C-alpha cells in the first residue's frame, strides 16, 4: 500500500505542462459490447505511454469517470493521439465504428488545459503521492505556502 502523508503537501512541476481530462459515460449499461472495449482500452494506452519516456507523457491518475493525464506539451499529446502506430489510433477508430448509429449507448469526452509555469496550486492532506505531486515534486507545505493564494504567489515569484 502507498505511503500516506498526513502532513499538508503541495506540488511543483518545472515549466509549462498540459492537463488532459478524459472520460466516458455509459448511457446504456446493458450494451456492454459497446462500452467495455472503451473501458479496457485506456489502461493499455497508459501502459504504452509509460514505456515511452520521450512521448511527453508525464503520468496519470486513473479514476472513474475521469482519468487525469499530465503532458509536457499539447504538441506531444496531439502527436500521440494521431500516431497510427500507437494503441490510441485503432481504439479510436473501433469506438467510432461502433457508435455510429448506436443511439448514444456510450459517450466519451475530453478537456485539455495548457498550464503556464507557476500558474497552478495544489494541496494534499492524508493522501499518498497523487496528481501533480506524483509527476512533479511532492513537497511539504511551509509558511510561505500556507494557503492557495500563498502557493500561487510563491510559484510566480520563483519564475
Image (cartoon, grey):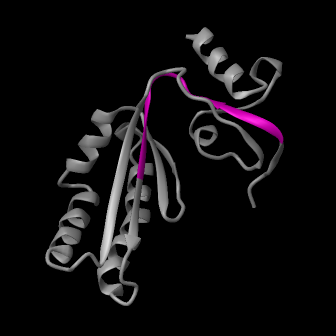
- Left-right relation of 33 to 138: left
- Left-right relation of 139 to 156: right
Main SS of the magenta part reads strand
- Percent x, y for residue 117? 49, 21
- Percent x, y for residue 109? 34, 58
- Left-right relation of 78 to 115: left
- Percent x, y for residue 66? 48, 58
Please, is residue 85 above or below residue 93 in the view?
above
* Observer-nearest of 134 and 25: 25
For image coordinates 38% across by 56% down, the residue present is 48
For image coordinates 79% across by 25% down, the residue present is 146
Counting every numbered tag in the picture gives 0
> To which quarter of the image does residue 154 belong?
top right
Please, is residue 6 above or below residue 15 in the view?
below
Name the quadrant of the C terminus. top right
Name the quadrant of the N terminus. bottom right
For image coordinates 56% across by 28% down, the residue present is 120
Q: Residue furthest bottom?
A: 30
Q: Which residues are magenta?
A: 7-21
* Observer-nearest of 140 and 2: 140
- Left-right relation of 28 to 104: right
> To which quarter of the image does residue 72 belong?
top left
The reply to whether the magenta stretch includes residue 31 is no
* Observer-nearest of 99 and 59: 99
Please, is residue 39 above or below residue 89 in the view?
below
- Percent x, y for residue 21? 43, 50
Amino acid at each position: 500500500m502507498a505511503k500516506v502523508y498526513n502532513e499538508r503537501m503541495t506540488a511543483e512541476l518545472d515549466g509549462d505542462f498540459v492537463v488532459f481530462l478524459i472520460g466516458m459515460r455509459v448511457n446504456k449499461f446493458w450494451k456492454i459490447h459497446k462500452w467495455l472495449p472503451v473501458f479496457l482500452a485506456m489502461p493499455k494506452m497508459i501502459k504504452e505511454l509509460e514505456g515511452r519516456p520521450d512521448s511527453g507523457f508525464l503520468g496519470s491518475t486513473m479514476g472513474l469517470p475521469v482519468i487525469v493525464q499530465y503532458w509536457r506539451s499539447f504538441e506531444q499529446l496531439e502527436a500521440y493521439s494521431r500516431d497510427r502506430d500507437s494503441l490510441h489510433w485503432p481504439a479510436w477508430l473501433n469506438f467510432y465504428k461502433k457508435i455510429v448509429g448506436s443511439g448514444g449507448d456510450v459517450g466519451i469526452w475530453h478537456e485539455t488545459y495548457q498550464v503556464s509555469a507557476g500558474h497552478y496550486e495544489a494541496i494534499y492532506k492524508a493522501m499518498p503521492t497523487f496528481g501533480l505531486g506524483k509527476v512533479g515534486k511532492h513537497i511539504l507545505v511551509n509558511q510561505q505556502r500556507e494557503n492557495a493564494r500563498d502557493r500561487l504567489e510563491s510559484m510566480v515569484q520563483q519564475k
